[in-house]
Amino acid sequence: MTSVMSELLRLEMAGWESLCDGSGDDFYRQIMTDDGVMVIADGTVLDRDAVAESLRDAPAWSSYEISDERVVTVGPDAAALVYTGHASRPGDEAPFVAAMSSVYVKQAGEWRLALYQQTPLAPPPGR
């Protein structure tokens, strides 16, 4: 596994952990670039402040899984982590499954999230 892959996976998993423990609003306010956006499953585009606000009282995820991950180099200080994400909340009939892309840029030596996008997928049979 490349260094960039391991760094971005570590950040992505930290984001998911924050969504599981209820601290996602603080995590994403800190990690997103000033002009960063998220394009969520229903097509809504949220800027950093709207992301943090939407996560403040959002129900926590109980579990998540990242699979089929790969890194696409976008430039000398930018890379996209592309993967399939599976996540569940208590009481959900089926997990949320989506193709996810997180574009990170290095600012002042730290990876920051500039763009996150999710496209819902049908859950695999038996999940």
Image (spheres, rainbow, N blue to C red):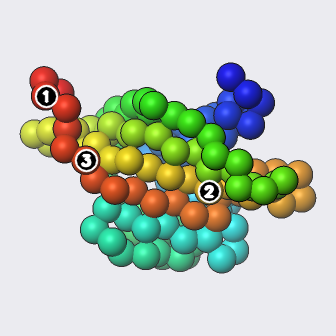
- Which amino acid, mark 1? Pro
Which residue occupies 84% across, 53% down?
Answer: 76
Please provide percent x and percent y for residue 66. 44, 33
Which residue occupies 13% across, 24% down?
Answer: 126
Q: Does the CB distance between marks 2 and 1 fall below 8 Å?
A: no
- Which amino acid, mark 2? Val
- Which amino acid, mark 3? Leu
Q: Is residue 30 left or right of residue 99?
A: right
Task: Name the one closer to the observer, 48 or 5.
Answer: 5
Crowdedness of circle 2 by 10 Å Cα count: few (<14), some, many (20+)?
Answer: many
How far, Cα to Cα, is label 2 from label 3? 20 Å
Q: Which mark is residue 103?
A: 2
Is residue 76 among the parts visible in the rendering?
yes
Which image quarter holds the N terminus? top right
Please provide percent x and percent y for residue 117. 45, 60
Q: Which mark is residue 125?
A: 1
How far, Cα to Cα, is label 2 from label 1? 30 Å
Q: Is residue 44 above or below residue 31?
A: below
Task: Give the residue number, with chain letter if any, for mark 3.
Answer: 121
Q: Does the CB distance between marks 3 and 1 fall below 8 Å?
A: no
